[in-house]
Image: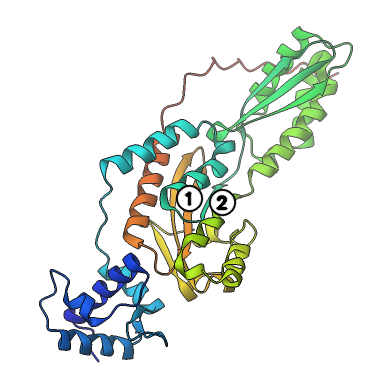
Amino acid sequence: MELTERKKKVLRSVVDLYIRTAEPVGSKAVTELPDMKYSSATIRNEMAELTTMGYLEQPHTSAGRIPSAAGYRLYVDELMMDYRLSIDETKSISSAIEEKMQRVDKMVEKVAKLVSQATDLPAISAASRQGNACVKRFDLILAGQGSFILVLMLGGEQVVNKLIKLPLNVGETDLKLLSAVLNASMTDIPLDGFTAELMEKVMRSAGAAASLVPVILDFTQETLKNSDSTSVAVTGQARLLSLPEYRDVDKAQRVMDSIDEEALANLPAVMEGASGTKVLVGPENVADELKDTSVVMTKFDIGDGMQGMIGVVGPTRMDYAKVTARLSYFAESLSKMFGKPEQPQQPQQPKLPEPPKE
């Protein structure tokens, strides 16, 4: 049985109507569409053949049809019309991003919340490093008597800090010297580059502050190790409860329980090597509990070797055109924001000569 252009047009109309109404679609509703020029009998026959071919299904309680997973897949791949965001939608997304996004280390959770609000669906956001993390800048700030703050600036504007006890014989001048040594010797070095030889070299140049080098090195290594992992945030699971597919509380609870950071941790890996937006329909999903849902994902660049991913989880009946358009605009806006020119940094400290070995 051939999938003709007429069958494709009927299938697209059925999917569009079902997305809009969440009710099984009858031939009469398709016939009444303005651009449908076929008779009711013709459309009824086409819907019957689409059911036989596996693109439509017929619920037991209704004479109407609903799309199958195969029908949604064909719709997403070939039949879906482009959705053009309104000016209000683009302004809303852009202003929300500009207001909320300030630093990458807080980005993952905030992005997930924004995407969930924009799509009214549960959302996932992830950030991972492509390649090796490294420290771009060290700052040592005196914090009163007996302590100082170690500040590490990583790629992607990520900043971490730690309060460290100061030895009695180390003053502000010693901290400035140590800061210069660290910036000259330990920036732009990946985790596996922090060797015993490097620590000895830095300690020989650090003067009175040499005893602080092992503490700083341990914290730096731990930070880089954590930075290499993928951060995942999921939010908005309760939004499913407003959808007719999840009126059954037990079904809704099973799906909501499966939409968490641990269950969806593999989704960023699904995007590796993919370009543009990726749609997983029903049985194509990685988790068994999500076999009756669809996942739409796309990537964005954070800069400094980091990549982000955003996506939503919803019923197979979701408005794919609108969701993909909004996710694509989110990704484009986030890439532009994180790719903006960096503020001028302080002049780089000159590399200090190593003192002669005794």
The residue where tag 2 is placed is: 235
Image mark for residue 133: none
The residue type indicated by label 2 comes to Thr
Mark pair 1, 2: CA separation = 7 Å
- Image point 61% across, 65% down: which residue? 258
Q: Earlier in the sequence, mark 1 or mark 2?
A: 1
Q: Is residue 354 left or right of residue 65?
A: right
177 or 148: nearer the viewer: 148
Mark 2, Cα crowd under 10 Å, few <14 / some 14-19 / many 20+, is: many
Image quadrant for the N terminus?
bottom left
Q: Position of residue 62 (x, y in %)?
A: 37, 84
- Image point 37% across, 37% down: which residue? 94
Q: Is residue 273 above or below residue 55?
A: above
Dot 1 and dot 2 residues touching (CB under 8 Å)? yes
Display coloring: rainbow
Q: Position of residue 292 (x, y in %)?
A: 49, 73
Q: Which quadrant holds residue 176?
A: top right
267 or 53: nearer the viewer: 53
Q: Is residue 173 left or right of residue 87?
A: right
- Image point 56% across, 46% down: which residue? 131
The residue where tag 1 is placed is: 116
Q: Is residue 124 left or right of residue 28?
A: right
Can the viewer see residue 88 in this picture?
yes
The residue type indicated by label 1 comes to Ser
Mark 1, Cα crowd under 10 Å, few <14 / some 14-19 / many 20+, is: many
